[in-house]
Structures are given as C-alpha cells and as structure tokens.
Image: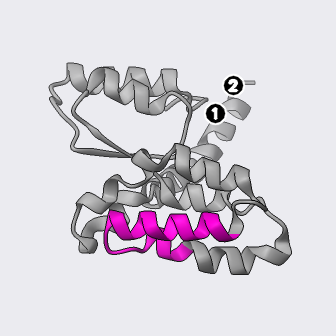
Amino acid sequence: MSETEGAHHWLSVLTDLHNRGIQDILIACVDGLKGFPEAIASIFPQTEIQLCVVHQIRNSLYIASKDQKAFMADLKPVYRADTKAAAELALDELETKWGEKYPIVLESWRSKWELLSAYFRYPKAIRKPIYTTNAVEAVHRQFRILTKPKRLFLMKTAY
C-alpha cells in the first residue's frame, strides 16, 4: 500500500517481488503510468509490456462529442481485429478518415502502438485479460472501499 501510485513506488514493489524469488513476469498490462514500463523492464527485462487498451480508448474520447459515436465505431476494428496486421490496416483507415481532424489522438495510437498491440501475439480467447487492467482496478477499488473507513476510524481514535 502506498499513498501514491508512481513509477518509483512500483519499482520498489517489483524489486521486492524479485528479492522474494520471482524470476520473471510473462506479461504486464499497465495503465500508461509514466515510467512504469521502464521500471518493469529494469527488474524483469524479458517481460512483455501491454498498455491497457481500455485506457487508450478512454483517452481517445477527448474529441468533439458529436464525433464520439462515429469515431468509436471506426476505432473498434483496430482493437478487435483478428491479427496485428488487420489492426494496423484498420488504424491506417482510421487515420485516413479522422487524422486531419484529430491528429493528436491518432499520434497517440501510433506512438504507443508496439505497447498497445502486444496482445495480438496471443490467442483471441485470452486477449481480453491481457489488454485491460480493469480486473485489477476492480480489486483495488474493493480494497479502497474496505480500508478507507478503517483509516478514518484509526484517525478518530488517535485523538
């Protein structure tokens, strides 16, 4: 537990895991926290990093509200493609249609593509747990719900 979730904190967590005997991590799906992929690579250099596609999709919605529905329909073939090649073709089509209007969004996908597309190397049946951090975030949310009242209780009894 930590008050903040910075890359430095996660580096200490990863170092602790390594010191406890963890030798390798196959895949790490991360939410885009700056420095987190580098922290993982410094302790577990063979780990495959996958940026959370759901976070990337959410970040792509900072566009005009009138365009969101159409943009999302055009974005779906990118992350739901059967192969990485098909996803790249869909990304090209997305950029052709929307790139002039929303260049920052498309540049974000392009610049992070290698980390966003790692899940395509795995069978379709197991891709969802690989490309999103939602399950882990749900657990963290439950921990916060359980620990927050106790923290308040401990603070009140200390007076």
Amino acid type for the residue under numbered disc 1: Leu
What residue is disc 1 on? 154
60 to the left or right of 136: right
Residue 146 visible in the current orientation: no
* Residue depicted at 51% across the width and 46% down the height: 31
Q: Which residues are magenta?
A: 76-97
- Colour mode? one colour
Q: Describe the element under mark 1 as helix, strand or loop.
A: helix
Q: Main secondary structure of the magenta part?
A: helix
Give the camera-side residue of 116 and 27. Answer: 116
* Residue depicted at 72% across the width and 53% down the height: 103
Query: Is residue 34 shown above or below 147?
Result: above
Query: Is residue 132 shown above or below 69?
Result: above
* Residue depicted at 42% across the width and 26% down the height: 38
Q: Mark 2, residues whose alpha carbon is within 10 Å: few (<14), some, or many (≥20)? A: few
Q: Residue 55 in magenta?
A: no
Residue 110 visible in the current orientation: yes
Where residue 116 sits: x, y (%)? 44, 52
Where residue 88 sits: x, y (%)? 43, 63
Q: Which mark is residue 158?
A: 2
Q: Residue 81 in magenta?
A: yes
